[in-house]
Structures are given as structure tokens and as C-alpha cells.
Image: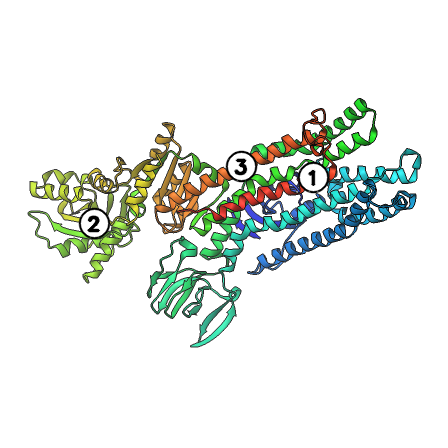
Amino acid sequence: MTDTPSLPHTAKIDFPITGMTCANCAMNIERALTRKVPGITKASVNFATERVFVEYDPMAASIDDMATAIEKAGFKALFQEDESEGSEDFEQIARNAEIQDQTRKFIVGILFALPLFLWSMARDFELIGHWSHAAWVNWVFLFLASPVQFYTGWDYYVGGIKSIRNQSANMDVLVALGSSVAYFYSLALLIFPGLGDHVYFETSAVIITLIKLGKMLESRTRGKTGGAIRKLIGLRPSTATVLTDRAETEVPIARVQMGDILLVRPGERLPVDGIVLEGHSSVDESMLSGEPMPVGKTPGSSVTGGTINGHGLLKFRATRVGKATALAQIIRLVQEAQGSKAPIQALADRIAAIFVPAIIAVAILTFFLWWGFTGQFVPAMIRMVAVLVIACPCALGLATPTAIMAGTGKGAEKGILFKNSQALEMATRITTIILDKTGTITLGKPSVTTVMPFVGSDRTPDQLLEMAASIEKGSEHPLGKAIVKEALKKGLVLADPENFKSTSGAGVEAVVRGGRVKVGKPDWFSEIATLQKRDKMAIAGLQSSGNTVMVVSVEGRLWGLIAVSDTLKPESAGAIQELHRQNLKVIMLTGDSRNTATSIARQVDIENVEAEVRPEEKSSVVKAWQEKGENVAMVGDGINDAPALAQADVGFAIGTGTDVAIETADVILSSGSLTGILRAIQLSRLTMKTIRQNLFWAFFYNIVLIPIAAGILYPFEFFPAMLRQLHPILAALAMAFSSISVVLNSLRLYQSRIE
């Protein structure tokens, strides 16, 4: 269960639910929460994951209120008082208990229904003596059928009654009606022999047993679609080695506190996130990034909980523990994505809302039509029962969420975190990709390449660098950090800036050692026109070779320039070429000068360049392309990318970037590589293809088999007799396995190759 803040006065919570049998149950829970609990603004129930996601005002609604509303609707909310690391185990225990209960009831069904079915069929086909037609045999059949009807099938009565009480109808209603018609008709024949002597106790018993088998297998199979979450949870070690007063103490991971010093030996998983204090090693971070190559770690390096230490001994300080760790956040993101509803699911939800009442109406109509045309009650009743038990709203309800679960789980394994299923669906429609330059196409770790005083300046390169670095001391911009780093590397003494002022997209200025200092783009300085030809040519030459040039002035006098260059990521050119091959329009967005931007773009084969764009203008660029009819994806990693990420149809955040960018984006690429975009698009296309397949077969199943159960093929003698007169037992068998086929199709996503 998670409980995280959202907007002011709004909280989010998700928790598991048991007792659902079809998509209508999910809608019943949603209605119960939104209508019966004041303060709930949104409730979304995922039938496949059996979890509910709620947005609510904690001042108006409580967890107890939600649990009460859910229980009154006929279901059970699973809460744990101690919100500890073992909460997932608590949920799994509850799920296993439910499966065991279903298994027991199925076994009871088999023990009574199988002999009843064999005995009844043997009597019908005259395989045993005339004694089998004695009146007492039917009473034995009643004895065998009753435990199945009222123990194995009791859940359907309870669920059906609660569903009707909620002014809705679910699958339980169909099963309870279908089996009860056969059972109570047969009971009436026993009590009133004059009505007839052919009972259908085996029909009701086998229907319930087969459907219970299907639900049991469905639960077990459906659980595999949540394997990604369990695999992620399994990455978290249960204990950690904490160093206290030079002694080693092994403690449960839930007891690790921020600031604790921890020790990780070779081959062990890191328990929490932290900063390395001592030791050198390589760490397998494939669970985080999807990349197989280990990453070197030295003092000062950050490490992530759940990753595997290589050959060295590491001592590190815990910086994020519990639910604040990167692994916990990944688990939360995957759970939220799996619980969200994709737009394509809307059609299935609308149909599911009217499905059961429509089927009941069709079954009643079937009964009266056949009774009216033939004058025979029993055949009409059999067809009505077949219609009731063959209809399957479960397949419709599982078609989308199981594929979403498998797709987002597969993505998590590859370092691609979809925040919601809307982003997963929208990624298939992308036509244009806008790439921020720094930190996305390039490494985002620029370094100083040139420090050059202008002609006539009496300053040395070190004096120029020292003045620029002093003003950039407090800057978070990568270029400013590069200048400070270079100055410190040279051992220069930096002053503290006063009256610091930043001009967005141009530069910074402050008072340093009594003089007004400005550092920024060349065109920010009106004095640039007074430079000699050699200096102007130097600026142009550095920019054309991909350097970002910054001019330094003190008290209105130009001192010189500092050129900073950022290295391309090794995979950028290949990834962008592949995006071109997929007929996607690629645009580079940067605040750099056009000469610098064009130089970088040329190296990675990008023709469309949006240069000299101020941070606040980036979202306007995205909007402009959207107004041209493009479905735009924005890829960035910085704070100034956040508005553009929010504006885009799909925002991709490079996982190595800032928290603000990651929080704003729809998709997080944990690897920090552009190849993640290709994987995300490929995965979204495969997932949507699977959803369409699932929906097709779910609709096809119901559209084709319900009329067959109603007897539409009866006049056509060239069809097999089993189709012309579909027996309710065959209908129940078909219904039992229809949902399983949808789940199995979704599970194929785990076997897909995502390159």
C-alpha cells in the first residue's frame, strides 16, 4: 500500500482488494467509493491487479471510511497496520489464502460433480442397468449436487446478491442464475414427479465446478503478469550491515536510518541508496538502467539500493532509505502505471457496464422464443442456461489491464518506467521527437576547452577564469559548474559574488571584489561590436566547432572569452539514425547559439534545430509543433525542461537528470540513454498490439458464441450437433477458459525482444 502527497489537501493511496470476479465488480467498487465516501475525488480499480487507486482529501475521508464502503459493496480491502517493508508479503499471504480457498472449493466440486456427471451420463446412454432409472437415484443426485451448489458455488450467490444490492450485476449473477435454473428445476421434478423425471443436477454441478476451475487457473495465471513487481521487490535485501563504533551489526533493512554508515561486501546487494565513503568497486546497475555493463564506483560516487556490488568492498553513507529509495520509487511508479486505465479501455468499460443485464435479457428472450416456437419447456430452459453461462465479461475486463501489466513490467526490466498507461498508449502515436541538447544528446558534463583574453586586454587566462568562476560559484547550470571546476583544478582562489542576478537565456552578473562582472553569451554584450577582427573570428570558429562561448566583462570592459564543450553520448548518433528510420521527425532544442547548435546537430544527423531558445520558451516550441498537427514527444533532463515535458504529448525524462524533470515527465529512461526512447516506442507498440488482439478475441468470443448458445445454428443441419444444440456444460467450459486465453496472450509480452 502506498500513501503519497499530491496537490495541496489531496492525497493518493493504493491498496489491494479481494473478492472481484469481473470488470463489473471493479466498477461497483469505484461507484461505492466515489458516491458513499465524501472527500474522494477519483477512484480507479484495476481488475487485473486487484488494486484500487484513490485520490482523496485526507481531511474529509479516511482509510476506515474507504474500507467500510468497499466491504458494504461486497469486497474486502487489504490494509496492514504496520506500513513496513513486509507489506507486500502481507498482500501475497492474503492472495495465497484466497487461491487456497478457491482450490478447496474446486476439489469439493470435483469430488461430488465427477461421480454425479459419470453416473448421469452412463444412465442417459443406457450404459448401466434399468435400476439407474429408479426414483431414489435422483435423490442421490440431489445429495451429490447440493455441496457443489451451496459450497463450491456459494461465492456466486453472495457476490450476485451484493452486486444486485449495489444496483448492478456482475458475472456472479450469470453463474448463479444459470446453475440455479438447472438445480431448482431438477429439485421441482423430485418434489412434483408429475412434471417429469429427467433431472439436470449434473448440469448445475459441472457448470459451477468448471467455472470455479477457470477462476482458479485465471487467478494463478493472472498472478504471473505481476511478476515484474515481485521481481523488483525481490531485489531488496532483507538485512543490512551497519557500522557503529567500528563494529559491524546486521539489522533488518527497515531499521536502516539516513546517515547510517553501511558496509557491502563483494557479491552482495546494496540495501539502500547512498554515497560511497571508502572503497573501489564496480556495481551491476542493470536492474535500474537495463544496461548490462557494470559501473565503476569510487569515493563520492552515488549507489542505489538493489544493485549488486562487484569485486570490491564498499563503505557508504545512507542518503535515502525505505520508500525514498530509487528502487521503492520504481516499484511505486510501476504499480501506479499498472493500475491506471488506458484510453483504449474506455470502450470495454462501457460495454461491461451493460453487459450482464443485456445477457440476462438475451437469455430470457431465448427461453421464450424457443418455448413459444417448439412448445417444449426443457430445451428452451437448456438454451437459456447455455446463454447465461457462456457469456464472459471477464475477458473484456482483463483484455487491457493484463497487457498493461505485462508491458509496464517488461519496461521496468529494461529501464523504462511508464508513469501511466495513457503515456504507454500515446507513445505509439508519436510523429515528432524534440531532444534537448545538454544531458540528452550530450553527456551534460561540459568542460572548459579555451580561456582566451581579448586583444588589448591586460589580463592573464587565469585572471579571466578566476573572475568568471567567482560569479558562477552558486550556479547550477552545467556550463557554470564546468568553469568553477576548471578554476578549482588550477588552484585559483574564488571570491564570493554579491548582488547576483541572472538573465534567463543570456547570462549572469554580480559584483566581485568591488567590480560589476558579467558572464554570458556574446550577443548579450553591446560592446562586442568593438572587438577586433581576430577576436570575432575566434568566437565564430569556436562556435562552429561545437563549443559554447561565454564572454567575460568587468565594469563594461571586455576581458576575454571562455569556451566550453560538451561531449556527445556514444550512442546518440546511432539512436537518432534509428529514429529517422522509423519515420520520426527529430528536432534538437537548445539555448546555445545557432552556430554551436548546428555543429552538434550536424554530428548526429539532425536537420531541424531550434537554437537560442530561452528556458521559458521551450514549452512554446513544443506547442508550436503540436499546432502543426504533430504528436510531440519531448526528451530532456533539466529543470528548465520541465514545462516542455509537461506540454508534450509524451514527456521522456532522462533518468540521470533532475528530480523536477523526472517528476514532470510521463516516461523515465533510467539508463540515461537515447536508446531508451527506441525501446519505449517499440514496447508501447507491442503492448497496444496485444491489447487490440485481446479485445478482438474477447468481443469475438462473446459476439459469436452467445448466438450459438441461443441456438442460431439449429436450423443448419450441416453444422455439428454439439454446435446446433450447445450444452450448458460445454458453454461453461468455453467460458472458463476464455479469460485464461486473454491472460496467456498478455504474458507473451514478457518473451518479446526489446532491443
Q: Is residue 318 left or right of residue 14?
A: left
- Foreground pick, 275 / 355: 355
Q: Nearer the viewer, mark 1 or mark 2?
A: 1
Q: Quadrant of residue 41?
A: top right
Q: Which residue is mark 3?
A: 693
Task: Quote the CA–CA distance across marks 3 and 2.
Answer: 52 Å
Can the viewer see residue 638 in this picture?
no
Residue type, numbered disc 3: Gln
Estimate how packed mark 3 is, as few (under 14), some (14 to 19) or many (20 or more) residues with alpha carbons within 10 Å: some
- Above-or-below relation of 173 to 245: above
Q: Secondary structure at mark 2?
A: strand
Q: Is residue 80 left or right of residue 559?
A: right
Q: Which mark is residue 171?
A: 1
Q: Earlier in the sequence, mark 1 or mark 2?
A: 1
Residue for point 43% across, 44% down: 667
Q: Secondary structure at mark 3?
A: helix
Q: Earlier in the sequence, mark 3 or mark 2?
A: 2
Residue for point 54% across, 55% down: 230
Find out whether the residues at labels 3 and 2 contact each other: C-beta distance under 8 Å. Answer: no
x and y, in percent, of residue 335 in the image? 53, 49
Q: Nearer the viewer, mark 3 or mark 2?
A: 3
Q: Which mark is residue 306?
A: none
- Above-or-below relation of 292 to 42: below
Q: Which residue is mark 2?
A: 564
- Foreground pick, 167 / 20: 20
Q: Earlier in the sequence, mark 1 or mark 3?
A: 1
x and y, in percent, of residue 146 in the image? 82, 47
